[in-house]
Image: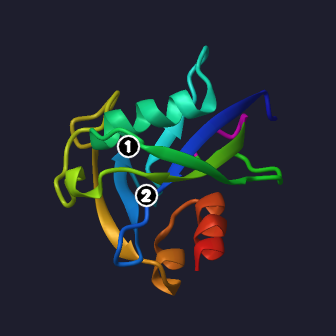
């Protein structure tokens, strides 16, 4: 039974080589690939949350953000069957030279020592679609392709 909304916000960063930034993570033993971003906290606006997430995950500041997509269909959370997910996606520009790829670190707020996150540049192709874990990310990847 759905008891609450879970608001999420993600950034789509595309470099000069037509590659998109993908986050590879493990939380509580569950491995997944997604766009960088995460949950909107109480008292936070959508863009505030996106800026906070990019600072926490990538240690970069967002220069510009333009709305790209919000899911307009019902989606249950992969982590909590009581949550209905509403995900906002923005095309963002950042200083891509400041992004450290392939360097694994413990995610902000992680509960287990085995948790990790790292980012890599992935070509915008069918491979991106098959790489993504979550249904909404797959839909966004398809829109990018």
The answer to whether 72 appears left or right of 6 in the picture is right
Residue 118: % across, % down: 27, 53
- Range drawn in magenta: 79-83
**Image quadrant of residue 55?**
top left
Closer to the camera, 95 or 40?
A: 95
Which class describes the residues within 10 Å of circle 2: few (<14), some (14-19), or many (20+)? some
Q: Is residue 91 magenta?
A: no
* Secondary structure state at the residue bearing disc 1: strand
Q: Residue furthest front?
A: 63
Q: CA separation, marks 2 and 1? A: 8 Å
Dot 2: element: strand
Mark 2 sits on what residue? 32
Q: Residue at x 65, y 59 (%)?
A: 136
Q: Is residue 27 above or below residue 12?
A: above
Mark 1 is surrounded, within 10 Å at the Cα level, by few (under 14), some (14 to 19) or many (20 or more) other residues, namely some
In the orientation shown, which residue stands out farthest toward the bottom? 126
Relative placement, left or right, of 76 versus 142 is: right
* Residue contact at pointers 2 and 1, CB within 8 angstroms: yes
Residue 135 found in image quarter: bottom right
Q: Residue at x 54, y 76 (%)?
A: 129
Tag 1 residue: 27
Spot occupied by residue 38 in the image (x, y as percentages of width and height): 50, 39
**Dominant SS in magenta:** loop
Residue 44 position in % (x across, y down) = 58, 20
Please identify the quadrant where the N terminus is shown.
Answer: top right
| Residue at point 32%, 31% (across, down) | 108
Q: Position of residue 46 (x, y in %)?
A: 61, 32
Residue depicted at 19% across the width and 61% down the height = 102
Quadrant of the image for the C terminus? bottom right
> Does residue 119 lie above or below 80 as drawn?
below
């Amino acid at each position: 039974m759905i008891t609450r909304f879970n608001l999420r916000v993600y950034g789509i960063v595309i470099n000069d080589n037509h590659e998109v930034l993908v986050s590879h993570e493990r939380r509580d033993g569950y491995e997944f690939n997604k766009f960088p971003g995460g949950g909107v906290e109480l008292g936070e606006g959508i863009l505030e949350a996106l800026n906070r997430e990019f600072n926490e995950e990538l240690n970069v500041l967002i220069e510009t953000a333009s709305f790209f997509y919000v899911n307009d269909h019902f989606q249950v959370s992969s982590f909590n069957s009581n949550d209905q997910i509403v995900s906002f996606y923005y095309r963002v520009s950042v200083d891509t030279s400041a992004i450290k790829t392939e360097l694994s670190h413990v995610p902000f707020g992680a509960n287990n020592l085995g948790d990790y996150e790292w980012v890599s540049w992935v070509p915008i192709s069918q491979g991106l679609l098959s790489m993504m874990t979550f249904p909404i990310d797959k839909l966004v990847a398809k829109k990018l392709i």
